[in-house]
Amino acid sequence: PMGHTYTTVSPVSWEMGQDDDDGSVWLAVGNVCRVSRMEWCVELSLEAGARRLHERVSLHNPMDYKQRFWFWNNSAVPATNDLHLVYPARKVMIGGRIYDYPVNSEGLDQSWYRNRHAAGDIFTLDVTEDFFGCHYTDSDFGMVNVASHEQVYGRKFFTWGTCDEGMMW
């Protein structure tokens, strides 16, 4: 997949509805790339009485041949000092260099948001589990993303960081 491309600011189609059987509400957002004809759709649903958002991503290539697809999916979470990343990784890439994870060679636990001072990404390497997420220790609340590691390679966390320049975002 390729992110940050010409489709980043393209208009999208959407539809909202409510399931008559269980009362859940849903939103579907999607698009067709005019160049490749690749299709994507993100379906979001809220179950009645539940405190969780279910997200389902569908990617479809209608062509008879393999091709690159231009799709990037982000789940944003509040940046607070009690935000703890739950990434099943032992090695990560940050700024093009490979580090031990979660504790690097300088003894810094990179899985805590409060320790991410500068803007940057954390890309996990060689992950064989099918999940990643985050946990807020103060409120005992969190988020989990589940996807086959054989179909979705790697996991990424991006932050603007806790320095003054990052906090303005």
Image (cartoon, rainbow, N blue to C red):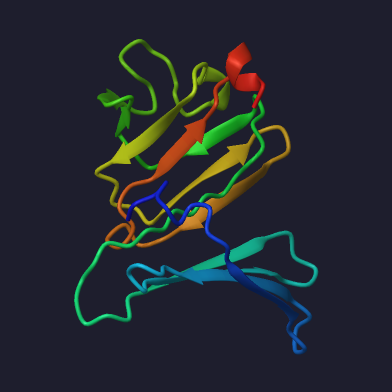
Identified at 68% across, 60% down, the residue is 52
Residue 42 in sight here: no
Q: How many marks?
A: 0
Question: Residue 103, position in %: x, y?
Answer: 38, 22
Question: Residue 65, position in %: x, y?
Answer: 19, 76
Residue in the foreground of this view, choosing between 31 and 55: 31
Position of 98 with respect to 77 (left or right) is left
Position of 139 with respect to 143 (left or right) is right
Quarter where residue 100 is shown? top left
Question: Residue 92, position in %: x, y?
Answer: 31, 32
Position of 105 with respect to 26 (left or right) is left
Position of 166 with respect to 138 (left or right) is left
Q: Looking at the rendering, in which quadrant would you find the N terminus? A: bottom left
Question: Residue 28, position in %: x, y?
Answer: 61, 72
Q: Looking at the rendering, in which quadrant would you find the C terminus? A: top right
When the figure is inspected, residue 80 is found, relative to residue 149, above or below; the finding is: above
When the figure is inspected, residue 162 is found, relative to residue 43, above or below; the finding is: above
Identified at 74% across, 76% down, the residue is 24
Residue 112 in sight here: yes
Residue in the foreground of this view, choosing between 53 and 90: 53
Identified at 73% across, 38% down, the residue is 139
